[in-house]
Amino acid sequence: MPRHDFVVGQLVKWYEYYADGDIVKDAGTGVIVDAKTHFYKSTGGSVYEYTNFEVYRNKNNDIITLNENDIESL
């Protein structure tokens, strides 16, 4: 079961950060166009999952891949 409430077609506010992850480089509105959930297994045997979202950015006229921490619902 997904750990997020985002769906394809949803309007969101996105944030793009510098490499240190603390300072916002750019932000704007966009639409989620795809969501891909990935699974990986740690060396200890635990299975983890995360979801990446492809977001169409209105002001940049492009698509960027972000995780659920980099977007919020509008």
Image: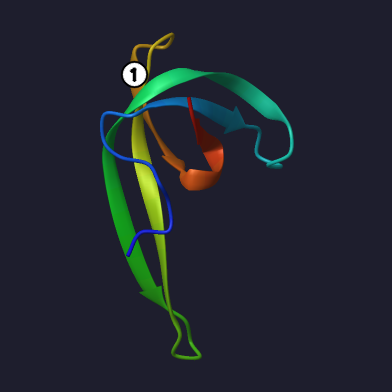
Front-most of residues 54 and 32? 32
Query: Which residue is painted at 31% across and 57% down in the image?
Result: 37
Residue 5, image x and y in percent?
Answer: 40, 46
> How many numbered markers are drawn?
1
Residue at 73 percent of width and 31 percent of height: 23
On screen, residue 16 versus residue 45, left or right, reads: right
Residue in the image at 74% along x and 39% along y: 22
Which quadrant would the N terminus be assigned to in this image? bottom left
Judged left or right of residue 33, residue 39 is right
Q: Position of residue 34 (x, y in %)?
A: 25, 38
Comparing 58 with 1, the one in front is: 1
Location of residue 15 (image quadrant): top right
Q: Secondary structure at mark 1?
A: strand
Q: Position of residue 7 (x, y in %)?
A: 30, 40
The residue tagged 1 is 62
Tell me the colour scheme of the image: rainbow
Query: In which quarter of the view is residue 24 placed?
Result: top right
**Up-down relation of residue 59 to residue 48 (above or below):** above
Q: In front: 2, or 60?
A: 2
Q: Is residue 25 above or below residue 19?
A: above
Residue 27 falls in which quadrant of the image?
top right
Q: Amino acid at mark 1?
A: Asp
Residue situated furthest bottom in the rendering: 44
Q: Give neighbour class at mark 1: few <14, some 14-19, many 20+ (Cα, 10 Å).
A: few
Whole-percent x, y for residue 36 in the image: 28, 51
